Amino acid sequence: MTESPTSAYDDECVRFTGYLIGMAPNAYVRGHYARACAARGLAGGDDTAFDRFTLRFAAQNRLFLRAADAYCALLARSGGLRRRLVLLAAILEHAAPTEAAFEPPVRRGAFGVLLRLAGHGLGFAAALILGLAVLAPARLAFGAERAA
């Protein structure tokens, strides 16, 4: 039995929404994500072999999703994973109740900002190292089918 495109989008939407904002998407967000993916050519048919590998890697768990996102943020900006995450972020930013995750940040002192920035930077660096270890060899193996 094959998985329907809608259920594949649902699983992906739930996983990506949890990663982006730590919440589960409602039916409105899931429906818009499925329609937007189809309309934007993200249905999977246009994905390169590397894109498909990256999506499978990212689907395994949140750590791998973070690593794949860090890698793609720098080295595969026009890839399928990055395009899907940006599309979903736009949908989430304009849908209730998920728009609250995009509200202005709480004011912090300079030390708090620096500490939080350092933490985010270290987390990104660790994720990027994992992403480089797994996805750079995969990209070489699959060949650069699409320019980054």
Image (spheres, rainbow, N blue to C red):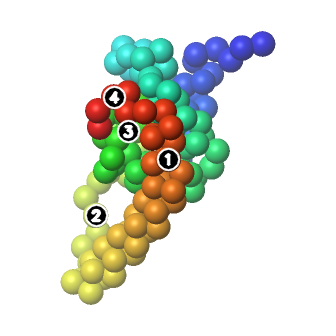
Between disc 2 and disc 3, the foreground one is 3
Between disc 4 and disc 3, the foreground one is 4
Q: Residue at x 34, y 18 (%)?
A: 40
Residue under label 3, please give it: 82
Pick whichever of labels 4 and 2 is earlier in the sequence: 2
Left or right of 25? Residue 143 is left
Between disc 4 and disc 2, the foreground one is 4
Mark 2 residue type: Pro
Tell me how far mark 2 sits from mark 3, CA to CA: 24 Å
Residue under label 2, please give it: 105
Question: Residue 98 placed where, x, y %?
Answer: 42, 43
Question: Residue 37 placed where, x, y %?
Answer: 42, 21
Tell which of 49 and 9 is nearer to you: 49
The image's mark for residue 137 is: 1
Pick whichever of labels 3 and 1 is earlier in the sequence: 3
Disc 3 on helix, strand or loop? helix
Mark 3 residue type: Arg
The image's mark for residue 97 is: none
Q: Residue at x 45, y 41 (%)?
A: 140
Residue under label 4, please give it: 146
- 10 Å neighbourhood of mark 3: few (<14), some, or many (≥20)? many
Question: Residue 89 placed where, x, y %?
Answer: 36, 40
Q: The C terminus lies in which quarter of the figure?
A: top left
Between disc 4 and disc 1, the foreground one is 1
Q: Are marks 1 and 2 in contact (CB under 8 Å)?
A: no
Pick whichever of labels 4 and 1 is earlier in the sequence: 1
Pick whichever of labels 2 and 3 is earlier in the sequence: 3
Between disc 3 and disc 1, the foreground one is 1
Q: Is residue 25 positioned above or below 113 on the image? A: above
